[in-house]
Every structure is written in C-alpha cells, then in structure tokens.
C-alpha cells in the first residue's frame, strides 16, 4: 500500500510535539511493507504542483491512502482530492481547542472559532486518530462526525539509548549541582511554566527547563516575563541539540501542565528512568499510576511535598524510575507500527463501504 504521510509546515514543526510524533510514526513504519511518501505534490511543493496541473500532469502524486497530521490548507486540499478519487483519508488530531489555548498570544481567544473549524475538518476523515481516550472524549464533545480511534504517540527508545553518558557534560554545561528538578519541551503557558517557577521560588533546588521558547510578539506575556526574568534558581536553556542530555542532567521530572493530549516528553523521561511528578489530569491517570510509576499532584503544596520527598529519598526515585521505564517500554515504536497498520486497514474498509453506498 502506498501511504501519503503528510505534515505540512514540516520544517517549522520539527521541534514541536507534533513533529516528534510524526517522526516516531515514520521511524516505526520504516520496518513495514507500506511505501511512504511525505509530500502530496508532484514536484515536491505546491507551486510546482500547480504548474504540473496546468500542463496536464496533475497536481497530486499517486497514493492509496492519505494520513494527514496538521489541520491546515494542505490537509484540506488532500482531503478534497481523496474525496474526489475515492481514497481513504486518515486525519491525526494532534490539535484540539483545549491544548491550543495558552500556547501563544491570542491562542485562547480564537478557541470557539478553532473548535468549529476542527469539527468540520476532522469530520471529513474516514478515520480520525488521537493519542488518548481523554482526547477522544474532547473531540466527541465538539462534536466530530467520524469514527475515532486512539493510538499512542509512542517513544523512540533507541533514540534515547546512551543518555546516561551525557550526564556530566550537560550538568557542567549548565552549571548544575545536587538534585535537579527539570522539564523538557517547548515553554508554553499551558505547560505550567508559571507553576514551575512558583515551585522554584519555594525551593532551594535547581530548576531547569530544557527547550525552546518564543520571546517575540507571538509569545504569551507570561512566557516572555518568566524567561526574561526567571527566579535565581531557574534556568531556561533554549533549544538543545541532543535531548538525551536533558534527561541525563535532571533528577526529578516535573511537568505541572494544565492540558495534554498525551505528553511525549513524559514518556521520554520515563524511558530514561526519571522520577516523574505530574499534575493529576484525566489523561495522565489514563496511562500512569500514582505511587507506582509517577507521583500525581493537584495543588502547589502537593507538588512541593512530592519534589522534596523525592529529593530526600534516592531509593524512591530509583523505584519510581524503574517502574516508569517499564511503562515507557509499553509505548515503543513496535506498538505504534502495529496500531497504524491496523488503523490503515480499518480506514480502507470504511472508505470502501462508504463508497459502495454512495
């Protein structure tokens, strides 16, 4: 089967959670008999495709199923092409109104319009994929008129191998000492950066957020304020070239995020054997168990107590980290491959049945 595995704005999204999820899928499918292409356009870009169409060659490459990852104009074009040619369309719901809010300046205000747009676009799919039952329930509430199937974002265990060897290098690079509390990923307001900094102000520990942040006009005022003037014991590193170094340098992974669809960085931290502290959210309770592979907290004092408990007890950190690594292995790329292959088969069956009744 020829599969179009399409992420528009790919270059801009390389450092995002969406970009990571797409890379995981492509790595997983490399061991599959499926033949993947990553651009729908003849010639590789829309402008060349327009020329190809003008001279009679057609704008779109040949494929048997389309799997699109971003709700943009390219996906709309692919969806229309799929409809006209009776091709199965799979759309991946990486974006919801809920997780878009609190990400950029004005992203919360556009929520109602975004929800209506997503409901319209996602309803055009023969099969809609999302990473969790929590996200599925959110999409059903919009409502979305398409079958929805959950599939883990997965974690690339092989890509994280050898992270421990980078511990000394990265701790020296950022001047870290003692038990370090850390987070990994893009610095967004919804990720709980304000809570992260409030916890730091109440602690003598070093806090580090490894990941890029926007300090320009599109950034939220909260992110701009905190990254420009963080507490004395907080470091915002910006982009780092090897994420393994982040997971090696820290000791207690703390993500007080307000909204997640799954959280790839959580799985990566677990895969590296970190002791993990998370906000008690339905999506995390779906995958993880308090006191076994993580600690779940609701209030600032609970976060503070969990961090100090772990900092004072290396045996507890080790036990939670070992169990967390077991949990992460359940989300390996072999599972991603199997679930994608099953989803593509289901989309083909549904599309064939739908076209037979038209």
Image (cartoon, grey):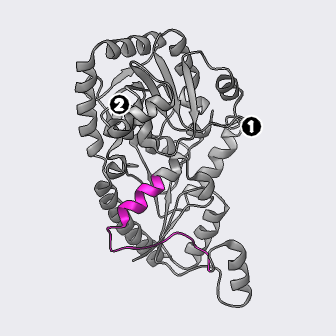
Which element carries disc 1, helix, strand or loop? loop
The answer to which of 145 and 260 lies nearer the viewer is: 260
Q: Residue at x 33, y 58 (%)?
A: 339
Question: How far from the left and from the top, in percent, is residue 281?
Answer: 43, 28
| 28 part of magenta stretch | yes
Residue identifier under label 1 = 216
Q: Measuring from the top left, give residue 325's x and y in whole percent.
A: 27, 37
Q: Which residue is mark 2?
A: 285
Q: How many marks?
A: 2
User: Against 205, is 267 above or below?
Assistant: below
* Residue 350 at least partly seen: yes
Start-end of magenta stretch: 21-42
From the viewer's perspective, tell me whether residue 233 is left or right of residue 114.
left
Tag in front: 1 or 2? 1
Packing grade of label 1 (10 A; few <14, some 14-19, many >=20) is few
Image coords of residue 206 (percent x, y): 48, 18
Nearest to N terminus: mark 1 or mark 2: 1
Q: Is residue 22 above or below residue 175?
A: below
Q: Residues within 10 Å of mark 2 (few under 14, many from 20)?
A: some
Instruction: Judge whether residue 54 is colored magenta.
Output: no
Question: What is the x, y in percent for residue 323?
Answer: 23, 32
Q: Which quadrant would the N terminus be assigned to in this image?
A: bottom left
Is 327 situated above or below 255?
Answer: below
Of residue 355 and residue 206, the one placed in the foreground of this image is: 206
């Amino acid at each position: 089967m020829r599969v179009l595995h399409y992420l528009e704005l790919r270059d801009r999204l390389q450092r995002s959670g969406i970009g990571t999820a797409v890379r995981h899928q492509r790595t997983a499918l490399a061991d599959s008999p499926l033949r993947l292409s990553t651009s729908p356009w003849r010639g590789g870009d829309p402008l060349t495709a327009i020329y190809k169409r003008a001279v009679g060659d057609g704008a779109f490459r040949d494929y048997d199923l389309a799997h699109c990852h971003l709700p943009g104009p390219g996906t709309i074009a692919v969806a229309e092409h799929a409809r006209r040619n009776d091709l199965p369309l799979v759309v991946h719901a990486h974006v919801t109104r809920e997780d878009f809010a609190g990400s950029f300046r004005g992203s919360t205000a556009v929520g109602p319009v975004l929800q209506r747009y997503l409901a319209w676009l996602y309803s055009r799919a023969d099969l809609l994929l999302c990473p969790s039952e929590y996200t599925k329930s959110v999409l059903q509430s919009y409502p979305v008129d398409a079958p929805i199937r959950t599939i883990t974002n997965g974690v690339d265990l092989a890509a994280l191998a050898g992270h421990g060897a980078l511990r000394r290098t990265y701790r020296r690079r950022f001047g870290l000492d003692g038990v370090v509390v850390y987070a990994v990923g893009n610095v967004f307001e919804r990720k709980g950066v304000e809570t992260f900094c409030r916890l730091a102000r109440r602690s003598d520990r070093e806090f580090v957020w490894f990941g890029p942040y926007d300090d320009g006009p599109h950034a939220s005022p909260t992110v701009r304020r905190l990254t420009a003037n963080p507490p004395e014991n907080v470091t915002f590193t910006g982009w780092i070239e090897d994420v393994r170094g982040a997971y090696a340098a820290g000791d207690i992974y703390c993500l007080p995020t307000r909204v997640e669809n799954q959280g790839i960085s959580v799985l990566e931290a677990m895969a590296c054997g970190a002791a993990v502290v998370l906000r008690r959210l339905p999506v995390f309770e779906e995958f993880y168990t308090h006191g076994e592979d993580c600690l779940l907290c609701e209030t600032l004092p609970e976060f503070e107590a969990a961090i100090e408990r772990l900092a004072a007890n290396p045996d507890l950190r080790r036990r939670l980290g070992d169990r967390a690594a077991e949990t992460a292995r359940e989300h390996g790329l072999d599972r991603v491959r199997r679930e994608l292959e099953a989803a593509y088969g289901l989309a083909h069956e549904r599309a064939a049945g739908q076209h037979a009744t038209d």
